[in-house]
Image (spheres, rainbow, N blue to C red):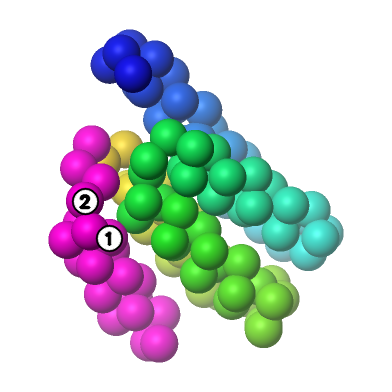
Amino acid sequence: MKHDAMLMIRADVVNRIDALAAQRGHIRLSTMCEEVDQIRHIARSYGMEPLERLASMLESALALDGHGPIILSYLDMMRDAAECEDVGPQVSSAYMAAISLRVGA
């Protein structure tokens, strides 16, 4: 995939994440879950493994806890992962470790 096209996809994902962060507390849980799932699907389609794994973890957290203070931590980390051009397994591991430390998992 061309670099410019990937930049557009990353920008779209970042915009989606920012929109979720702006609506936190004012969005239905089901809508939040649907939006996170769409982000996860986009990440999977374009090989953005760190973002896909973070979105999956957020989906699990939402299923367990609903709306909580950890959402912004996940969204911040997802934004970072969306902007990161490295997508290998070592990068995914680093993001998983970072979110675990951040949310105390």
The amino acid on which the numbered mark 2 sits, given as a three-letter code, is: Gly
Left or right of 95, for residue 21: right
| Residue 98, image quadrant | bottom left
Question: Quadrant of the image for the C terminus?
Answer: bottom left
In the rendered image, residue 57, in percent from the top left (x then y), is placed at: 50, 70
Q: Residues within 10 Å of mark 2 (few under 14, many from 20)?
A: few
Disc 2 designates what residue?
Answer: 88
Q: Could you say which disc has been placed on residue 49 in the image? A: none
The amino acid on which the numbered mark 1 sits, given as a three-letter code, is: Ser
In the rendered image, residue 85, in percent from the top left (x then y), is placed at: 23, 36
Compared with 66, 42 (above or below) is above
In the rendered image, residue 33, in percent from the top left (x then y), is placed at: 71, 59
Q: Could you say which disc has been placed on residue 92 in the image? A: 1
Question: Quadrant of the image for the N terminus?
Answer: top left
* Disc 2 to disc 1: CB gap under 8 Å: yes
Magenta range: 85-105
Camera-side residue of 72 and 100: 100
Count of numbered circles in the view: 2
Residue 100 on the magenta segment: yes
Camera-side residue of 26 and 41: 41
